[in-house]
Amino acid sequence: MHKNKPSRVLSQKEMRSLALVHVQAYVNACHCQSRRDVLLALAHWQDVGVNMSDFIRNTRLIVIDENGKHEL
């Protein structure tokens, strides 16, 4: 990506599509052999998502770029 062109936030539809691609890749990488295996893999994925959400919600985030320092 060019430095002069800022990136844009994906739309909700684009986010959902991207998430689906990665969830499918994750489940395939887990080599699930049964529905139970898939559900277990998805439970772990969900747990990581909950923990990440809690971290983002409760942590002060600062981005430093060529325009300076920005708090999220």
Image (tube, rainbow, N blue to C red):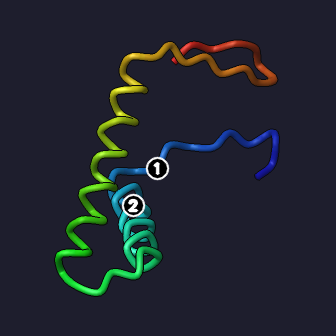
- In the displayed structure, 49 sits above or below 42; it is above
Foreground disc of the pair 1, 2? 2
Circle 2 sits on which residue?
19
Residue at the disc numbered 1: 10
Q: Is residue 45 left or right of residue 22?
A: left
Residue at (56% x, 13% y) in the render: 71
Q: What residue type is labelled 2?
A: Ala
Residue 26: percent from the left, percent from the top?
43, 69
Q: Which residue is drawn at 35% across and 35% down?
A: 51
Residue 33: image location, x then y, percent: 29, 86
Q: Nearer the viewer, residue 8 or 50?
A: 50
> Residue 43 versus residue 23: which sits nearer the camera?
43
Q: Residues within 10 Å of mark 2 (few under 14, many from 20)?
A: few
Residue 56's x, y, as percent?
42, 26
In the image, residue 8 above or below residue 34 = above
Label 2, secondary structure: give it.
helix
The image shows residue 68 at horizontal and vertical percentages of 75, 14
Question: Is 24 situated above or below 17?
Answer: below
Amino acid type assigned to the residue bearing label 1 in the image: Leu
Query: Measuring 34% from the left and 44% from the top, which residue is drawn there?
Result: 49
Q: How far apart are marks 1 and 2 (CA)?
A: 12 Å
**Circle 1 — which element?**
loop
Q: Which residue is drawn at 36% across and 22% down?
A: 57
Q: In which quarter of the image is residue 28?
A: bottom left
Q: Few, some or many C-alpha atoms within 10 Å of disc 1 (few <14, some 14-19, many ≥20)?
A: few
Q: Quadrant of residue 66?
A: top right
Q: Nearer the viewer, residue 12 or 63?
A: 63
